[in-house]
Amino acid sequence: MPEAAPRPISPAASHEPIEGGTAVLPEAPPPQRKPMPGWAVLLHNDDVNDFAFVARSVIEFARLPHADALERTIEAHESGVALLVVTHRERAELIEEQFRTRGLTVTIEPAR
């Protein structure tokens, strides 16, 4: 059998620029990122510690402004519990641990 002649490569199939222009590759869509599920950090009422101590702890650990920290501390005192922040799980666990070191009760749960 005679040997087949090599087939020519079309310019579109090569990775070289086409004469008079440049090969353009289709743009890839940006990767889709799912937001991390949120975790609610809840401050519970504390009848043992001083109100100012609790508010200062909220400012320090939850990183809330002074007015918001006071509002949340009052809410926890009056209703038994107050939402401090919704954040990712690792930060929520850290905040819970920090409050525990001061004898304060904070719990975390998946945000709704």
Image: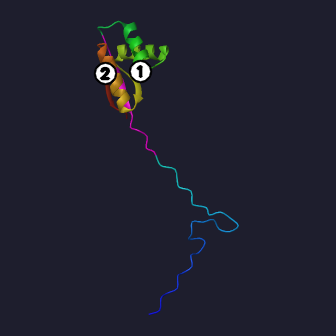
Give me the disc on residue 97: 2
Residue 33, position as x, y percentages in the image:
45, 45
Drawn side of residue 65 relative to residue 76, left or right: right
Mark 2 or 1, nearer chain start: 1
Q: Is residue 66 left or right of residue 19?
A: left
Q: Is residue 19 above or below residue 85?
A: below
Apparent side of residue 68 relative to residue 49 in the rendered image (left or right): right
User: Among all residues in the image, which is located at the extreme bottom?
Assistant: 1
Does the image show residue 104? no
> Observer-nearest residue: 29 or 12?
12
Q: Residue at horizontal 43%, vertical 40%? A: 35
Q: Is residue 14 magenta?
A: no
| Magenta-drawn segment | 33-46
Q: In terms of depth relative to the viewer, which is nearer, 77 or 62? A: 62
Q: SS at mark 1?
A: helix
Tell me the mark number nearer the camera, choosing from 2 and 1: 2
Q: Crowdedness of circle 2 by 10 Å Cα count: few (<14), some, many (20+)?
A: some
The image quadrant of residue 53 is top left
Name the kind of residue labelled 2 in the image: Glu
Measuring from the top left, give residue 89's x and y in whole percent.
35, 32
As drawn, 25 above or below 65: below
Residue at image location 57% in from the left, 60% down from the top? 26
In the depicted structure, whether residue 44 falls above or below residue 53: below
Quadrant (top left/top right/bottom left/bottom right) for the N terminus? bottom left
* Most foreground residue, 69 or 6: 6
For the point 59% across and 70% down, the residue is 12
**How far apart, in angstroms, are the residues tagged by discs 2 and 1?**
12 Å
Looking at the image, the residue that sits furthest to the right is 20
Q: Which residue is mark 1?
A: 62
Residue at 36% from the left image edge and 17% from the top image edge: 76
x%, y% of residue 111? 37, 33
Q: Quadrant of residue 93?
A: top left
